[in-house]
Image (tube, grey):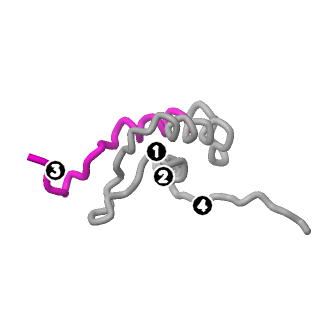
Amino acid sequence: MLMTKERRPAIRTLRGWALAVLQEAGAIHECEEHGWARDRADPHARERALDIARKEPPDGIYPNEAIAEARTVLDSVGDTCPECPPQGG
């Protein structure tokens, strides 16, 4: 039986690709209610995402560009949803 490598769906922007990779690696997740990306603060997941960016950048993108975009997206994502009410108190 012929086995093929599963490919990620086509993404229109480098930022969209980075978000998909970060989510796949478990470095970020979506707020269930509002859809905002939230940082999971998991250093192992971050490393997995950067490893994917290094080894499997999008077509036409150098690995260092893919890694830089993943880091830029990580730096722009907070650990809370801006629309959710504050927790605790």
Q: Nearer the viewer, residue 8 or 43?
A: 43
Q: Secondary structure at mark 3?
A: loop
Query: How far is the residue under mark 4 from the one under mark 1?
Result: 20 Å
Q: Dots 3 and 1: beta carbons under 8 Å?
A: no
Residue 13 as seen in the image, left or right of residue 37: right
Quarter assignment of residue 2: bottom right
Query: How far is the residue under mark 1 from the one under mark 2?
Result: 6 Å
Residue that numbered label 1 is attached to: 27
Q: Can you tell which of label 4 and label 1 is closer to the viewer?
A: 1
Residue 74 as seen in the image, left or right of residue 82: right
User: Residue at point 55% right, 58% down?
Assistant: 11
Residue that numbered label 2 is attached to: 23
Question: Is 39 in the magenta?
Answer: no
User: Residue at point 32% right, 64% down?
Assistant: 32
Instruction: Tell me the kind of residue under disc 2.
Output: Gln
Query: How far is the residue under mark 3 from the one under mark 1?
Result: 21 Å
Name the N-terminal-most of marks 2 and 4: 4
Query: How far is the residue under mark 4 from the one under mark 3?
Result: 37 Å
How many other residues sit within 10 Å of disc 2, few (<14), some (14-19) or many (≥20)?
many
Residue that numbered label 4 is attached to: 10
Which label is found at residue 87?
Answer: 3
Q: Which residues are magenta?
A: 66-89
